[in-house]
Amino acid sequence: MKYLFLIADGMGDWPLDELNARTPLQAAVTPHMDALAKQGIVGTCRTVPAGMPPGSDVANMALLGFNPANHHTGRGPIEAAAQGLELADNDLVWRCNLVTVSELSVNGFMRDYSAGHITTEKAMPLLRGLQMRFGSPRFTFHPGVQYRHLLVQKGAAGSDEAGIHVQPPHDITDKSIAASMASYKANPPLHELVMRASHWLAEDADNDTKANAIWPWGQGRPLRLPSFEKAHGLKGAVISAVDLIKGLGRAADMEVLDVPGVTGLLDTNYAGKVRAALDFLSHGDFVFVHLEGPDECGHGGDIDCKVEAINRFDRLIVGPLREALAGEPATFLVTCDHLTPIALKTHHADPVPFLLNWPGCSEPSGVGEFNELSAAQGVRVSKGHELLPWVLAKTGRGA
C-alpha cells in the first residue's frame, strides 16, 4: 500500500456572507476531493494540542505522527533543520521575517508580514548586508526563502532572555506591534540588533523593496525528532516550497524532494510536485505533499484567491495523483494543517476537515461534497498526532 497525505495549508475556513454563507472550500470546484470523500470516509481532527499556538509548525508535526507537546521547540529550529545548520544544543534559533511596519516602536503597526511577498532574489542582498554589518559571534543571519529567514543567537537557549513572547507577524496584520516591542526589550542584545538592523533596512540600505524591518520570533533550541521510518514503518518523503515542511522531514530522516519552480504561492509548480510524488512512490511508501497557497490567500483576506487556490489544489494536485494511481493500492488522506479564516487573516485551532480513501473501504461516507460541514458529520480524531496511526490501522497496516 502506498500512502499520500495531501495538505492544503490553511484550506479550512468559516462561512462568509460574500459566499452566501459558504466557506471557500464549499464554494470551490472540487470534483476529485468530492469523489474521494464519497467513496471513502470523512471526519475532523484537532491538529493543535490545547494550549499550543495554531501554527503550521505545530500542526504539520502532528500530521506526521509526532506529538508537538513532546517534540516542538519552536518554528525557527524547524526551518534551521531544513537548511542543515550545524547548531549547538544551547543555541537559540529565531525565525526572522522581513516585514513592513508603519514604524518600529510601540506606536507602530504590522503592515505586511511578508514585505510585499518579497522575492528570494530581492531578499538575498539584504540578508548578505545584514550579516556583513550586524553579524557577530553572538548573532548570525542565515538566508532562507522569500521573506522567511533565520537568526541564530549563540548559546542563549538557557537564558532568561530566551523565553520572551514575540507575536507571529502574520497574526497581527494591520494591528499594533506594541506588545512585541515590549517583549524585545526583555532581551536587550536582541532588541539592540532589531533596532539597528531595521534602521539600516529602512534608511541606509540600497533597498527598493517593502522590507523596512526584521522580525525575529518563533525561537527555540535545535529540533530533534525520531526517525519517521522507525516510528511508523514507512519510507517517507516530503514535498513543499517552504522550509518549515522541509525541516520537519529532514529532522525525521525523511527524503526532502526539491521541485524547481515551487513558490509557496498561488502560482507554483503543481505538475512538478505531482511528478516528484509519483517518482518517489515507485520505491517509497509515504509522501507528504504540502501546498501553501490557500494559507497565503487566507492571510491576505482574499476570498477569490483562496477559492482559486483550493480549485487548483483539487484540479492540479489531487486529480492528477488520483488518476495516475487509479487501480493501484493507494491510500489518500486529504486535509489541511489548520484553519486560516478569511475573517481573521490568521490561523485558528478549530478541528480540520479530512477525507480518507483507500481500496476496500467497506463503509463509505456517501457524502456528496467534501467540506467543513460534511466532515463535521463524520468521525472525530481528537489528537492530531494520532491521525497517521489511525489511518494505518484503518487500512490494515497498523501495529
Image (tube, grey):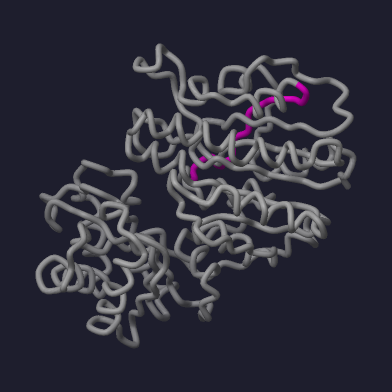
In the image, residue 64 lies at what x, y percent?
67, 51
**The one of 342 and 309 positioned closer to us in this rendering:** 309
Left or right: residue 96 compared with residue 65: left
Say left or right for 263 vs 133: right
Seen in the picture, residue 233 relative to 299 is either above or below; the reply is below
Q: Which residue is pictured at 32% across the width and 63% down the height?
A: 216
Horizontal side of residue 293 vs 165, given as left or right: right
Q: Is residue 238 above or below residue 347?
A: below
Q: Where residue 135 sits in the image (x, y, percent)?
A: 29, 82
Q: Position of residue 357 (x, y in %)?
A: 77, 32
- Above or below, 104 relative to 199: above
175 in relation to 203, above or below: above
Q: Position of residue 179 (x, y in %)?
A: 23, 50
Q: Quadrant of residue 209?
A: bottom left
Please give the name of the residue rendered at 52% of the width and 31% of the height, measured from the top-left corner.
311
Residue closest to the eye, 113 or 108:
113
Is residue 5 shown left or right of residue 159? Answer: right
Q: Nearer the viewer, residue 57 or 149?
A: 149
In reply to whether residue 273 is colored magenta, the answer given is no
Looking at the image, how many numbered discs can be counted on the residues?
0
**Outermost residue, top direction?**
20
Task: State which region is magenta.
Answer: 39-52
Dividing the picture into quarters, in which one does residue 301 lie?
Answer: top left
Q: Residue at x 40, y 43 (%)?
A: 296
Residue occupying image coordinates x 35% and y 76%: 141
